[in-house]
Amino acid sequence: MWNSTFGNISERGDVSVASYTLAVVKLLFVPVIIGGNFLVLASVCVFQRLRTSTNYFLLSLAISDLLVGLLTIPLYAAFYLQAGSLMHNRVACLAWFGSVILGCGSSLFNLLLIVLDRFMAIHFPFRYGELRTPCRVVSALTGLWVYVVILSCLPLMGWNHWDDASKCSFYSTLPKAYVAWSAYLTVGICILVSSLLYGKIFLTVHQHRKKIQALNVASSRENQWMQREVRSTRLSATVFLLFVLFWAPYFLVGPLKYTSLSQEVVEIIKNTTLVLAFGNSMVNPVVYGLARKDFRTAYKVLVVTPITQWGGLRNVPLQGEDAREMVERGACTTAQTAAH
């Protein structure tokens, strides 16, 4: 029944309508993705208090999401809005696939680095500063981006099965070994390792709290440190969980290609789940704003301050009465400028 129903839809030409509609919906995501992640980038770059090693990982993740909004979604939409001319264009096809690997792959590896950072903070608190030096953070992020850029460019560099007589297809255009590694093994390994590390982290936190309660010897300074690290870990775990929830449907429907369902049906299902997957690039800036007051204040200050004056915000406080006054003053200045 499922197959026959969608088969009828295909015969009526509604598959093309559905694909076009989903492409337009994805394009609507673009300004939100770019705007939100630009705020994250600007917040970390502008405000001195946000220039921490942990926040550099969030900045790198924001760059991944920006790439989705700037490259992946526009290329994807172009293929469905101008399918006739692009489906047989080798460079456009391979660039499209490369942009997906670049955005999704870099996000995964950023999330893995974030959980490794949280693991060191919780398990090796006295050596944390020694283990996670600024130089090592920069080296790790540089290595991440070099690897992902090379991986995403391999098809363009010649590792592909392009055939001028066939249409652009992820599974037929790219070698099986490349698809298996870049789309399944990498995703599986990163998610498995991250899940195990988060499980170990929260188990350690639980055991630590039980020991403190039993001995009743923890200082207020130690409690403050633990609470701060746990809050940071909860934030990163939330970001990781959201990534899994948003992307899981897309990867789970991949095997449908090898079932008895028509390819038109598979295309509709895949495109629908991809709308959800791309939506993940919108949520991280919102999560940071909801979970962290310093990011929330930074957003407000940046929004009410003309971009030409951002250079003077370097030492602006992001908490307390001074921060609130700064936001109110910026809002008044913006209103006066608009009035004139």
Image (cartoon, grey):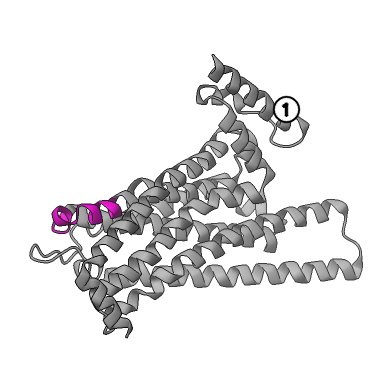
Q: Is residue 40 magenta?
A: no
Task: Say which of 60 and 78 sits in front.
Answer: 78
Q: Main secondary structure of the magenta part?
A: helix
Label 1: state its secondary structure. Answer: helix
Image quadrant containing the C terminus: top right
Q: Give left or right: position of 244 versus 228.
A: left
Residue that numbered label 1 is attached to: 325
| Relative image position of residue 315 (x, y in whole percent) | 65, 28
Looking at numbered disc 1 in the image, what kind of residue is underneath it?
Glu
Q: Residue furthest right?
A: 216
Instruction: Answer left or right for 104 relative to 36.
Output: left
What is the magenta range?
Answer: 75-90
Closer-to-camera residue (84/168):
84
- Whole-percent x and y of residue 185? 39, 72
Residue 332: image x %, image y %?
Answer: 64, 22
Query: Is residue 21 shown left or right of residue 216?
Result: left
Q: Residue 265, how many percent across, how many down?
A: 28, 74
Asked whether residue 176 appears in the rendered view, the answer is no
Q: Residue at x 56, y 58 (%)?
A: 239
Q: Is residue 77 magenta?
A: yes
Residue 193 in sight in this render? yes
At x 21% / y 57%, what residue is drawn?
93
- Please report the residue visible at 74 percent of the width from the left and 29 percent of the height from the top: 322
Tell me the quarter of the picture where residue 262 sits: bottom left
